[in-house]
Image (cartoon, helix red, strand yellow):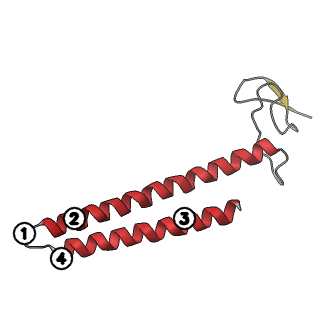
Amino acid sequence: MALITCPECKSTVSNQASACPKCGFPFATRGPIRTKDHQTRLVEKTAKSYKAAGCLSGLICISGGVLVVIGLQSEPTNESLVFLGIGLALIGLVWNVLNRIVAWWSHG
């Protein structure tokens, strides 16, 4: 048994421990995840990536809508800007739907 230093609280801990007994910091494991707290942390990390992708797809939808409005309000109507905006809005919408399906599928 070797001793390692906890990166969170700097206490000495066994290398076989799944978490620091002093502060609860989970240690990376090879193989199956041993503690419920560590599994929760992994889900939170992946959930953050899904939230970031959802925010980005929302921004793409909004920017597409803004381009449509600008294209329709210009004199004469800028059709290429309108089509670009509709395309961006559809891409953002499809990305958002797919992102939600993958998040649901991954986390049940």
Give the residue number, with chain letter if any, for mark 2. 69
SS at circle 3: helix
- Going by the numbered disc 2, the residue's amino acid type is Val
User: Quadrant of the image for the C terminus?
Assistant: bottom right
- The picture quadrant where one finds residue 99 is bottom right
- Alpha-carbon neighbours of circle 2 within 10 Å: few (<14), some, or many (≥20)? some
Q: Are marks 1 and 4 in contact (CB under 8 Å)?
A: no
Q: How many marks?
A: 4
Of discs 3 and 1, which sits in the foreground? 1
Percent position (x, y) of residue 27?
77, 39
Residue 37 placed where, x, y %? 77, 41
Judge by depth and name the residue closer to the eye, 88 or 15. Answer: 88
Amino acid type assigned to the residue bearing label 4 in the image: Glu
N-term-proximal mark, 3 vs 4? 4
Q: Is residue 61 left or right of residue 19?
A: left
Q: What's the distance in space between the residues labelled 2 and 3, CA to CA?
A: 26 Å
Q: Pointer 4: what residue? A: 79
Percent x, y for residue 66?
26, 61
Q: Residue furthest right?
A: 1
Q: Amino acid at mark 1?
A: Glu
Dividing the picture into quadrants, the one containing residue 64 is: bottom left
Which label's residue is closer to the chain start, 2 or 3? Answer: 2
Amino acid type of disc 3? Answer: Asn
What distance separates the C-alpha of mark 1 from that of mark 4?
11 Å
Residue appearing at x 33%, y 74% in the figure: 87
Residue named by callout 1: 75
Q: Secondary structure at mark 2?
A: helix
Closest to the observer, 89 or 14: 89
Would you call the spot at circle 1 few (<14 residues within 10 Å), some (14-19), or many (20 or more)? few
Residue on which the image places disc 3: 99
